[in-house]
Amino acid sequence: MTNKRIRKAVIPVAGLGTRFLPATKSQPKEMLPVVDKPAIQYIVEEAVASGIESILIVTGRNKRAMEDHFDKSFELETILAEKGKTGLLEIVRSVSGMADIHYIRQKDALGLGHAILQARAFVGDEPFAVLLGDDIIQADEPFLRSMMEAYHREPASIVAVQPVPRKDVDKYGIVMPKAAGPAPQDQPYFEISSLVEKPRVAEAPSSLAVIGRYILEPTIFDVLERIPFGAGGELQLTDALQQLSGMSRLIAMPITGVRHDIGDKFGYIRANIEFALEREELKQDLRSYLRSLVQQIHTMDSASQAAPTVQGKRVRVRKTGRV
Ligand code: G1P
């Protein structure tokens, strides 16, 4: 086991984004904006704010817009400078100066484990962080930093976890805590005895789901090289961690803050609202809009409860009062 400083992060983004078609037909889903910043920027900002020095984005086809986003934009900068739009110029410049970002293409979509394997040469023999692009964590302190601090106190691979509704366990990697007893999600971190990727609801060992933040020891690469393809016919990072749990200590860290699953339409809409509520220039208008919307919904709900029935069935009343 190594106990080195964590300097590098890997962000796999090679997925096709089919849940957001047609928006993702010609642009990567990671470029969809949450308020006014592409989703990927939130992830990069969390890594940088946590002290990560170097980032590898594992991309696939159709992801070039992301590289352009973090690159310099001479034309745009020149135009903004000429027009004296210094505020905007500052924003545009800060994006390209944000971090030391490298890219590698995952040529075949063979799963998260396969994407991580592409990072082997970049990572070398150091512990490293992994951040998944679909999970934005909204918190006062960057959550990855807490994981990195935990690693420095207790060097072991760490996965972020969060309790999810039982019916949803088949969408996640699920962990089995080592110790029986009180709900471990109330502890800052706890040891895991096993993990399983996307179990059936009836077979899940708990409702504690792996969320897209990991601190990994470099031994994970050897494990990934030799494990078979798993759930969905893909090389699964969870399977490699399961193997690792038999060889060394594995820690789960319940997330603090709010996790937004922006790979899901509802999660994406919610993230936009919650982040907009934090923005000075938007929050006032948004709050009063939400207040009036809630009132409208209440009115509609009570109207439908009081709606007349025809042969035992509720009849919809239009706003005009006509049935
Ligand atoms: C991936 C991981 C899964 C994890 C999830 C978190 O799944 O394989 O273990 O729980 O991210 O978002 P995916 O969402 O890519 O299917």
Image: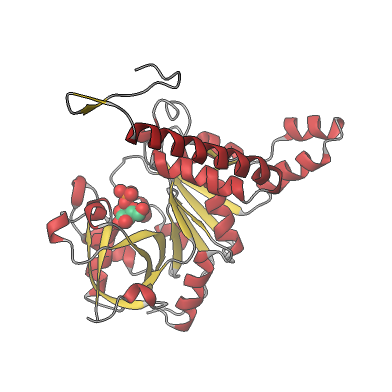
Residue 47's place in the image compared with 267, above or below, is: below
**Viewer-nearest residue: 19 or 180:** 180
Which residue corresponds to the image point at 42% horizontal and 48% vertical from the top-left?
134
Residue 6's place in the image compared with 13, above or below, is: below
**Viewer-nearest residue: 304 or 105:** 304
The location of residue 268, given as percent across then percent down, is 45, 42
- Name the image quarter holding the N terminus: bottom left
The location of residue 60, given as percent across then percent down, is 41, 39
Quadrant of residue 2 within the rendered picture: bottom left
Which residue corresponds to the image point at 24% horizontal and 82% vertical from the top-left?
181
Residue 51's place in the image compared with 122, above or below, is: below
The answer to whether any part of residue 70 appears in the image is no
- Name the image quarter holding the C terminus: top left
Quadrant of residue 91 within the rendered picture: top right
The location of residue 218, given as percent across then percent down, is 38, 68
Question: Is residue 117 found left or right of 57 in the rendered image?
Answer: left
Which residue corresponds to the image point at 43% horizontal and 66% vertical from the top-left?
255
Question: Is residue 129 found left or right of 177 in the rendered image?
Answer: right
**Viewer-nearest residue: 170 or 44:** 170
**Viewer-nearest residue: 291 or 193:** 291
